[in-house]
Image (cartoon, rainbow, N blue to C red):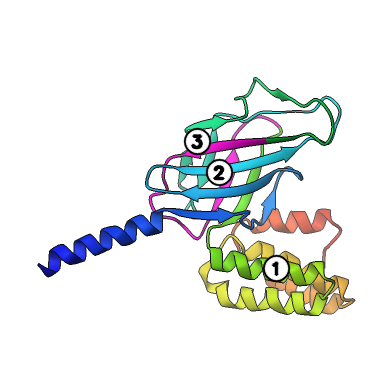
């Protein structure tokens, strides 16, 4: 009797865990400035990602390659099943004017287990899109959003403390958000006029072993941030 009840209870927990929604989840780096993840939903049937992209140029176009993947933290990949609202390359959606937005949906197989973060990568020959370190933890997303709100309100010190607190809480987990946190701490220290502090965090970041570390260092260097 106990075994049957326990099995049924665990099944309910599994279904609850599998069905989750993440509204505009945070990410570390992305390839296209105006490409946005509006929502990511997971269930026992599929993983659905709703995105939008805004055109910025005359004669702009956009498409998605069939070789688009969700990448688990361990490097395992699952391939996209279908796309809605956007053509597969080499067919393209032609924008009528700058400022036009395209909303589209990508569907993947169900996640075998909802990880704490994923990468989304289009594997193609040119102009491929990617998101690195997409956070699939609503509590962590809330904390990161709060830190960004402090930064947007020009409360640099409070924003920096918030990002540091989050990093200290999650540092041992090797999360995809680690690079995002370091980059913001370094940038905020620089904005606050503390180059020594920024340099210290930069050196710590280099030795952190964070996922996709070299991509983040390149991003900082391209912004003129190097110590």
Q: Which label sits in the foreground, 1 or 2?
A: 2
Residue that appears at 82% across and 64% down: 226
Image-quadrant location for residue 67: top right
Does residue 119 show up magenta in the picture? yes
Categorize mark 2 by other alpha carbons within 10 Å: few (<14), some (14-19), many (20+). Answer: many
Residue that appears at 59% across and 35% down: 123
Query: Residue 20, how many percent across, how many down?
Result: 46, 55
Q: Disc 2 and disc 3: Cα gap in Å?
A: 10 Å
Is the residue under label 3 in contact with that under label 2 (CB below 8 Å)?
Answer: no
**Vertical relation: 82 (above or below) 175:** above
Indicate which disc, 1 or 2, sits on the residue closer to the N terminus: 2
Q: Disc 2 designates what residue?
A: 49
Query: Residue 54, how many percent across, how many down?
Result: 76, 38
Indicate which disc, 2 or 3, sits on the residue closer to the N terminus: 2
Q: Disc 1 and disc 2: Cα gap in Å?
A: 26 Å
Image-quadrant location for residue 97: top right
Which residue appears farthest toward the top when viewing the image?
Answer: 91
Q: Disc 1 designates what residue?
A: 182
Indicate which disc, 1 or 3, sits on the residue closer to the N terminus: 3
**Vertical relation: 83 (above or below) 15:** above
Residue 129 in sight from this viewpoint: yes
Which residues make up the magenta segment?
Answer: 103-126
Q: Which label sits in the foreground, 1 or 3?
A: 3
Query: Residue 59, how many percent across, how many down?
Result: 83, 24
Categorize mark 3 by other alpha carbons within 10 Å: few (<14), some (14-19), many (20+). Answer: some
Categorize mark 1 by other alpha carbons within 10 Å: few (<14), some (14-19), many (20+). Answer: many
Going by the image, does 84 lie left or right of 77?
Answer: right
Q: Disc 3 designates what residue?
A: 80
Going by the image, does 50 lie left or right of 205?
Answer: left
Query: Residue 48, how many percent across, how many down?
Result: 51, 43
Front in this rendered view, residue 189 or 143 = 143
């Amino acid at each position: 009797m106990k075994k049957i009840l326990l099995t049924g209870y665990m099944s309910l927990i599994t279904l609850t865990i599998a069905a989750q929604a993440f509204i505009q989840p945070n990410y570390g780096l992305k390839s296209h400035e105006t490409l946005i993840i509006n929502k990511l939903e997971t269930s026992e049937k599929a993983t659905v990602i709703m995105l939008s992209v805004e055109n910025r140029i005359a004669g702009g176009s956009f498409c998605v390659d069939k070789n688009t993947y969700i990448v688990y933290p361990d490097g395992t990949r699952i391939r996209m099943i279908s796309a809605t609202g956007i053509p597969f390359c080499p067919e393209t959606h032609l924008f009528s004017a700058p400022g036009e937005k395209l909303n589209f949906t990508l569907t993947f197989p169900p996640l075998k287990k909802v990880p704490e973060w994923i990468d989304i990568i289009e594997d193609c020959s040119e102009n491929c899109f990617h998101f690195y370190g997409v956070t699939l933890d609503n509590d962590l997303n809330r904390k990161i959003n709060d830190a960004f709100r402090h930064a947007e309100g020009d409360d640099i010190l409070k924003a920096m403390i918030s990002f540091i607190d989050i990093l200290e809480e999650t540092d041992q987990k090797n999360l995809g958000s680690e690079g995002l946190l370091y980059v913001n701490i370094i940038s905020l220290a620089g904005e606050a006029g503390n180059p020594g502090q920024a340099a210290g965090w930069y050196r710590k970041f280099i030795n952190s072993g964070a996922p996709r570390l070299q991509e983040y260092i390149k991003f900082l260097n391209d912004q003129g941030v190097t110590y």
